[in-house]
Amino acid sequence: MRIGSLFVGGVQRYGVVDGDRIDLLPETADVFEVLAAGETGAAGERSAWDETASIAVPVPVASIRDFITFEQHTAGSLRAITGTSEVPDAWYEAPAFYFTNPHAAIGSGGPVPMPPGCEVLDFELEVAAVIGTAGFNLSVAEAADHIAGFTILNDWSARDLQSREMRVGLGPAKGKDTATTLGPVLVTPDELADRDGRYDLAMEVFVNDTRIGGDTLASMAWTFAELISYASRGTWVRPGDVLGSGTCGSGCLAELWGWRGDRQPPPLRIGDTVRMTVEGIGTVHNTVVAGPPLHDVPAARRGSAA
C-alpha cells in the first residue's frame, strides 16, 4: 500500500495512491489505524495524483529522530570537519541520532526557504521508517512489526549554522531547523523486498538535473529494526514517529567537500532544485527560495551569574 496526502479545499487529506490517482480516506480517519487494520476505508472520493506537483507530507508526523548509519558518509563528513576520515569507535558501539523539528516537515514540491543567516546550505539523502503502532523498550525482533512504512527524507542542513552551534557541545539544532522533506508517499513494508531486514534500494540525488551522488540503502550499518529498538530503549515510540536512516554515501555536499578538499559542488543557492529518487518509493523535489530576515540576538552578558 502507498499512502499519500494532498490539500483538498484547504484541508489536508490522506489517501491510498494508485498510479495517477489517490483514493481519499474520510477526513476523520486515522491513517495509522487504517494501516494497522489493512483496510483503506476509502471515502469514495478520488483525486488526481501528480508527484511532479506540490504535495503534502504523506502521514502525520509526531517526532523526527535522525540517525547516522552510513560509514562512508560518516568518514567523509568527519574529514570535512576535522581533517581526518577515521571513524571513532563510539560510532560503531551504538546508532547515534538527534531529534529535529517535526513542525518543519514539508512535502515534495514545497519551497525551502534559505535559513536566516545561512550561506552554506546543503541537502541530505535519506530513507525514513515511520512508526505505525506504539511500542516500549522493544527488542530487535519486536521492532520491525511497529513499522508502518518507508518514505524519502531530505534533511536540509545549514552547515555554517550547524558548525557554529556544535562547537558548544550541543546540536545540531538551528542548523537543521528550517525544513525536512518527507515523501512522496509512505510505502508499506510488504511493497519492498528485504533480506534480513535490509533493503537494497538504489538512492540518487540531483541538483538542477546534475547527478551529485548515490548509494544503496543496504549500506546502512544497522537495520531499521535495530534503530527502532535502540530508539525505544527505556521509552516509547508512537505512531507518526519518523526515524531517518542518516545520509547515504555521497548523499550530501558536506561529505563530498571532505573527500575533495574544497566546496565543490558549491553550496545550494536560491533557485536551485534538489531532486531525490529512491527505488520502490519514488521521487521528491524542492526548490530553494529566499528566506525570512535575520533578527539579531545579542551575545551573552559575561559574568551575569555573579
Image: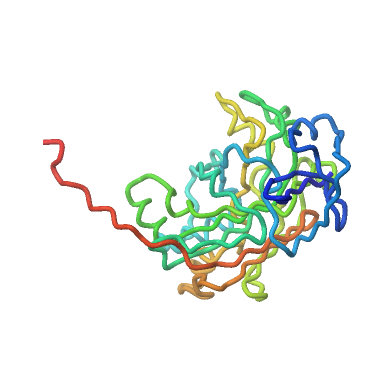
Who is closer to the viewer here, 33 or 135?
A: 33
Q: Is there any visible trace of residue 193 in the rendered image?
A: no
* Residue 114, placed above or below residue 181: below
Who is closer to the viewer here, 47 or 240?
A: 47
Image side of residue 33 versus residue 155, left or right: right
- Residue plotted at (83% across, 57% down): 48
Rendered location of residue 112, percent (x, y): 55, 61
Rendered location of residue 291, percent (x, y): 46, 63
Instruction: Tell me where residue 223 sits by quadrant.
Output: top right
Q: Quadrant of the N terminus?
A: top right
Image side of residue 181 versus residue 149, left or right: left
- Residue plotted at (65% across, 43% down): 222
Q: Is there any visible trace of residue 141 in the rendered image?
A: yes
Rendered location of residue 183, percent (x, y): 69, 53
Q: Quadrant of the C terminus?
A: top left
Residue at the left extreme of this rendering: 306
